């Protein structure tokens, strides 16, 4: 017997990667915990994938026949506690293979084979294997695999999305995946309970601003079970235009923690790991027991403040050594420097300190009006912003893009040590895009 397992409360990436593994290894059964997310549960009730998928509670798992398990494949998970009660079945397997994309922690499953790639979705890893082995999948299966990738990458918008995710989606579309059917299960209207909980979370929101990053932290209590809290996290982070969001929701005797992040400064999985959970940098979660909500909320805020990574600063993006014009140089001498270094803007320096900014255009205009032998200080721009090496990147961005200052001098102890230009900003933006 060959089986596939995935983490408790499976989402679409968990389900689709499990189905992909079943196809790849010709498994007999996919075993899910009984507490599947609402949209996943509805999908399973509606669709026949041609694969045996069992949703088992703890007692049903314990009552499973003691049949020999030749292979157990675990997808979208590499930690035993994330499997919940399903992890007990691993001890019966002759061979265990793990597929995962989460970077939060080393695996404790003790797999015979481990396939880890930091893609946007675990499903992408399996789709690549299916494509390499030229296995056939039907349109219904292709649509499910597409949903798994779309859900975990935020419709290919999260900064964890990789080019491999896009190529996997293209392959699935070629295999007949129905793109129009994806939003029905991934984007859902809210229930009355979700609307109430959303309002509570918005009213209870605390904003943490650090390193130029806006992080929302909120909590709420609800006596009844509310499905798809992660969906509410997506809504809030977009509605409030936050860089990251962490919400704690007490449901009965347990607390659900959901984290979302759009910035490299906050790793959602690192925060949730402190509460026994996991995930990836852009999306993570945890189930917290034996803590009161106020205590968990205070602990969460403290961990966020400890774990926020410093953002880029002026020193990391500036150009140096600096090409500059002396306060006493003439228009002709300045033009020679502009031509030599092929620059359009330069700082004007007096005794090591920036006292002005001047452009090639200003110099040419001055020469045209007969000022070749005049000092550049007569027309230099004297109202400008300058920064120090530790000035956060976002403040520099505001000066260049917001105040339309084309060059920003960087000074340390009153001495010019670098400059930042629009070109430097564009280079940085391109590097960030390449990383995602």
Image (cartoon, helix red, strand yellow):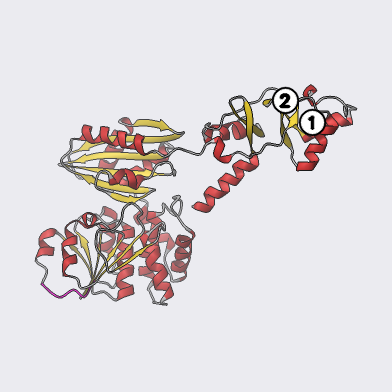
Q: Which mark is residue 273?
A: none
The quadrant of the picture occupied by the N terminus is bottom left
At a point 32% along the width and 58% down the height, the residue shown is: 12
Question: In the rendering, at what x and y percent does residue 176 appear?
Answer: 43, 70
Where 284 falls versus 54 (above or below)? above
Front-most of residues 392 and 192 = 392
Q: Is residue 41 above or below residue 423?
A: below
The answer to whether residue 416 is left or right of residue 235 is right
Q: Name the residue at 82% across, 37% down.
A: 336
- Please tell me which of labels 2 and 1 falls first in the chain: 1
Task: Label 2, secondary structure: give it.
Answer: loop
Q: Secondary structure at mark 1?
A: helix
Label the magenta part by its dominant secondary structure: loop
- Image marks 2 and 1: residues in contact by CB distance under 8 Å: yes
Where residue 86 appears, x then y in whole percent? 18, 61
Q: Is residue 400 visible?
A: yes
Q: CA distance from mark 2 to mark 1?
A: 10 Å
Q: Residue at x 47, y 38 (%)?
A: 311
The residue wearing badge 1 is: 362
Where 145 falls versus 277 (above or below)?
below
Give the residue drawn at x 22%, y 32%: 294
Task: Confirm whether the magenta stretch covers residue 70.
Answer: yes
Task: Report the residue marked by disc 2.
Answer: 381
Along the horizontal axis of the image, is 223 left or right of 168? Answer: left
């Amino acid at each position: 017997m060959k089986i596939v397992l995935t983490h408790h409360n499976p989402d679409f990436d968990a389900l689709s990667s499990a189905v992909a593994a079943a196809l790849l290894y010709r498994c007999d059964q996919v075993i899910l915990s009984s507490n599947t997310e609402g949209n996943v549960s509805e999908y399973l009730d509606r669709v026949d994938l041609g694969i045996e998928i069992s949703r088992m509670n703890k007692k049903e798992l314990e009552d499973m026949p003691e049949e020999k398990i030749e292979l157990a494949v675990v997808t979208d998970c590499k930690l035993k506690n994330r499997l919940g009660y399903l992890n007990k079945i691993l001890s019966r397997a002759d061979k265990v293979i793990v597929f995962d994309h989460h970077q939060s922690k080393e695996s404790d499953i003790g797999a015979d084979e481990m396939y880890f790639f930091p893609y946007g979705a675990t499903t992408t890893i399996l789709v690549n294997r299916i494509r390499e082995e030229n296995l056939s999948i039907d349109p219904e299966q292709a649509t499910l695999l597409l949903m798994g990738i779309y859900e975990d990458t935020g419709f290919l918008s999260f900064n964890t999305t990789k080019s491999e995710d896009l190529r996997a989606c293209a392959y699935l579309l070629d295999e007949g995946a129905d793109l129009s059917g994806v939003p029905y299960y991934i984007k859902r209207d809210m229930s009355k309970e979700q609307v109430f909980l959303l309002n509570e979370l918005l009213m209870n929101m605390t904003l943490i601003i650090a390193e130029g990053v806006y992080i929302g932290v909120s909590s709420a209590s609800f006596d009844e079970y509310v499905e798809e809290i992660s969906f509410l996290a997506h809504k809030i982070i977009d509605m409030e235009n936050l860089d990251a969001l962490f919400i704690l929701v007490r449901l009965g005797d347990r607390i659900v923690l959901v984290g979302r992040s759009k910035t490299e400064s906050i790793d959602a999985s690192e925060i949730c790991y402190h509460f026994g959970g996991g995930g990836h940098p852009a999306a993570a979660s945890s189930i917290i027991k034996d803590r009161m909500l106020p205590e968990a909320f205070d602990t969460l805020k403290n961990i966020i403040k400890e774990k926020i990574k410093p953002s880029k600063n002026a020193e990391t993006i500036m150009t140096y050594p600096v090409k500059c014009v002396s306060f006493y140089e003439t228009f002709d001498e300045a033009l020679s420097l502009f031509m030599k270094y092929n620059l359009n803007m330069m700082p004007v320096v007096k005794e090591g300190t920036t006292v002005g900014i001047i452009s090639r255009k200003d110099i040419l205009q001055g020469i045209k009006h007969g000022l070749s032998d005049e000092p550049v200080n007569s027309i230099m721009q004297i109202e400008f912003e300058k920064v120090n090496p530790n000035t956060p990147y976002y403040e520099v961005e505001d000066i260049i893009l917001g105040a339309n200052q084309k060059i920003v001098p960087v000074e340390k102890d009153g001495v010019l040590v670098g400059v930042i230009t629009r070109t430097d900003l564009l280079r940085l933006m391109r590097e960030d895009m390449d990383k995602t």
